[in-house]
Each structure stands twice: as structure tokens, then as C-alpha cells.
Image: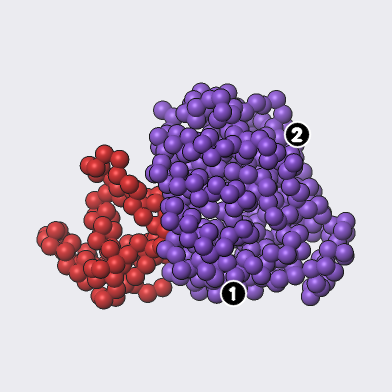
Amino acid sequence: MLPNPLALIAEITHRCPLHCVYCSNPMQLAATQSELSTEEWASVFEQSGKLGMLHAHFTGGEPLARPDLRELIAAAHNARLYTNLITSGIGLSEPRLKTLVDAGLDHIQISFQDSREDSANWIAGAKSHAHKIELARGVRRYKIAFTVNLVVHRQNLDHLEEMIAFIEQLSPERVEIAHTQYYGWALTNRAALMPTQAQLNRAVAIVAEAEKRLAGRIRIDSVVPDYYAKYPKACMGGWGRKLMLINPAGKVLPCHAAEVLPGMSFENVREKSLEWIWRESASFRRFRGEDWMPEPCRSCERRSEDFGGCRCQAFLLARDATATDPACSLAPAHHLVESAVREANSEASVAQPTALSSFVQLQKLTTDLWTYRTNPE
Amino acid sequence: MASPLDSSQPRLAAGCRWAPSTTGKEENRMILFPEGAIKLQGTGRQVLERCDGQRTFSEIIAELQKEFGTTDPEKIRADISTFLEQLQKKRIVDY
């Protein structure tokens, strides 16, 4: 029997005041005009609760860009969902945070781009770091869970120790050290973002030390980036097995990146019920289970752990959505990942700009380094 | 990280809460927290239902020792202490 989905990822808008170079949103962003209305989202949350989902993760873009966020959180809360706001913090004042908490917000997750202000602003493509700190200091006045999210990559991984010390002062319960995953804008910018093996080894040691030191105070979640791992990640816990993602325009996807897959069409909550989409739609059934699997997945004993890895990564790298994820060391297309790793560790690889440069200097020095995420129409 | 003291008052950490009951008579109750949920039954449930920030660790143990009269009281104390320590590490419980 098909189990219920566990959680809803609500990408409520693709608008964002930041332009982070590692953004995993699709290059083709959903237009502002196409966004679901307050009432349409409320119906989505109601259906999610009835379907047995437990969590609603509000993300974007920047969810705070929606002036009706309070109403949306209240609707999810009333549908018995645990509500999580994944945010840059830009657009949040303390009074607004209070209204969100009063509406039923359970958890806030604020991202930081670096511990150093100039570098953080450079990565975000916006002057935002100081404001984020100010806001994060106010979070502990409320009885909600607080996670800090650090997206790490080649340009900031050398500051990891400093970043963890910086986060400690904000006293979250959790820190997520998220190595950049190469989808959307991050894939475009991969050469500038992929860490070296030496950077990664140092980071692993720093995290192990911090975990020991902070046990009982701050929980650290960190995963080795998949390009450097032996086996692929169980992307989204398997296609159509645990999660449903709804994009700003109401399109229902099994993951953040699925829209890139050719030849697939995804249903819209404006036309079909969530339950029907979960149980019956061709898109959610496409890679559910094991029937679609090629070798070596089909006979691999790990197939029920990682489900063959990520379908989108298989398409983005090997141009075949039904291939074994090239991140897997057993994949026929693994050489594609190996060559990217080799390049990241070669002498010709992207240099890091001098530390201690200002935000403006950094931007000038690195105009050709990467593409900043833009905003939707 | 230290185990709870006799005077500790264990409680659910900020942003962790019981899932609302749907029928009012479930034998499994669920605790929701940022990255997921745990289903609790039996002793685990009995312990966490007493982690209200009011009762002390020693009071919780005394109550449960009464419930499980035949079990070795020291074992009950050790088991509950380990249980709470693990949940604190996951940042689901504070004490």
C-alpha cells in the first residue's frame, strides 16, 4: 500500500531580495503573476493535513516576500501541520516575527552566507549580512525552534571554524551545514563553488570536533557532498515516497528540480487534488518503486536505501533521467563526476579572491566568476 | 554532555510539541520537531508525558518506579536517564 506523504514543501514565491550564487531554484523561475492566491494555498494546506502530512516547509525564493505569509502560516497551522519558515531573514522585523509566531509558526531556519560580512554579501549579491545578524539575535525571544543554515562551498569553506563560532553566539538548537548541491543556479556556477578535497577533509574534521564540543547544546547536521561520496544521496527520500513540492504557480513536483526533466508534465493544484496527484498521477508514479531502475541499481543491495540517487542529477549530468545517478561510484556515467572533481582539484581550477577585500572590490574582481540569481518576471 | 540531575526539570525543547490528537484515544502519540516526528508508545511515552518542565527528574523516576514496581529501580533510573540524554542530543528535550 502506498504510504501518505510526510511533508509539503511550499515554494510560495520565487521572488527574493538576495541573489545567492548557490541557489537551487530552477533557472526558469515562476513568474510573479502566476503565483497561487492566499485561498489557493489555504486549500493546499487543508488537503495536506487530510492526506496525513505532518510538516509544511515554507520556502521560496524568499517566503517573506509574500505579504500574506501570516495568513498562510495560520492556514497550515489550522490544518494541523508543523510549520517551518526557511528564510534569509530579509523582510522580517521583530513585530512581523511576532505575528508569525502568533499565527502558529513552530520553527525558523535562517541562512547565513559566511561569517565575514564582505564575503557574505558578495556571495548573496546583496548587502544583507548585518541585518540578518540583528534579526537572528531577536529570534530567541520567542519559543520556537531555531536552526541556522550554512550553505558551504569553495568560497567560504575555509572559514568554517569561524562560521560555527559565529553561529554559537546566536544560540540556535540546530545548525545545518549544507554543502552546495548542483542544481539550478548552483550548477551554472559549479566551477566556482566546488570545494577541493583538502577543503573538504578539513571541514569534516572541524565538524567532528564541533559536534563533540556542542553536544546537548547545538545539534549539527552535515552531510558529505555527493560528488565526493561513494554512493548517491537518497534524493527526497525517494521519488514520490515522502515529499510533495508545490511551486509558486501551483505545479506539484516530487523535488525541487524535477521541472528540468524532459518529456514529463506535472499536475497543478488548480486542476487536481493533492491526493489524486500523490496516488494516481503519472508524474509521481514515474520513478516510484524499482521498476524503472537500470543496472547496476536493479540488482544493487543499496537500491532500497538510495533509490538509485537523484533523477534530476542523472539528467543534468548524463542527459538521461533513467540512468544511475552519476554521483554513485558504481554508475556507468561516474566519470562525469570524477572529471568535475578532478578539475576542482587541479591547478587550473578557480582561484579564491583575496580575503579581506570589501564587498564592492570582491564584486569587481569576480565579474566573470559566477552568475548571480535573478528575479522572476 | 551531562545526564539529567535529580533536580533537573526536563521539558520539550522550543519548537518541539505533541501532535494534536485526531481521535482522542490513540495509543501512539507523536512528537513533532523540526526535522521530523517520533511515534511514542509504552514507557517512552510515559516518560515524555511527564516532561512538563514542572516535575523534577527524581519525581518522574519515582512515579515510573511506582508503575513498574517489579523492575529494578536502578535500571529504570539508568534507562530513563539515557533516553533523555539521547533526546537532548537531538535537541528535542531540554533539562
Q: At 28% from the left edge and 63% from the top edge, which residue is drawn?
A: B51
Chain represented in purple:
A
Q: Do the residues at pointers 2 and 1 share their chain?
A: yes
Nearer to us in this view, A198 or A240:
A240
Chain B colour as displayed: red
Q: Residue A351: x, y in percent?
A: 84, 64
Residue bearing the label numbered 1: A165
| Residue A61 visible in image | yes
Q: Residue B94: x, y in percent?
A: 37, 67
Q: At 37% from the left edge and 50% from the top edge, which residue is drawn?
A: B38
Task: Name the subunit of mark 1.
Answer: A
Q: At 61% from the left edge and 69% from the top edge, which residue is drawn?
A: A133
Which element carries disc 2, helix, strand or loop?
loop
* First-in-chain label (2 vs 1): 1
Nearer to us in this view, A35 or A235:
A35
- Front tag of 2 and 1: 1
Task: Name the subunit of mark 2.
Answer: A
Q: Is residue A86 above or below residue A165?
A: above
Which quarter of the figure is the N terminus of chain A placed in? top left
- Residue A166 falls in image quadrant: bottom right
Q: Residues within 10 Å of mark 2 (few under 14, many from 20)?
A: few
Disc 2 residue type? Answer: Arg
Q: How many marks?
A: 2
Q: Residue B34: x, y in percent?
A: 46, 54
Give the CA separation, mark 2 to mark 1.
Answer: 41 Å
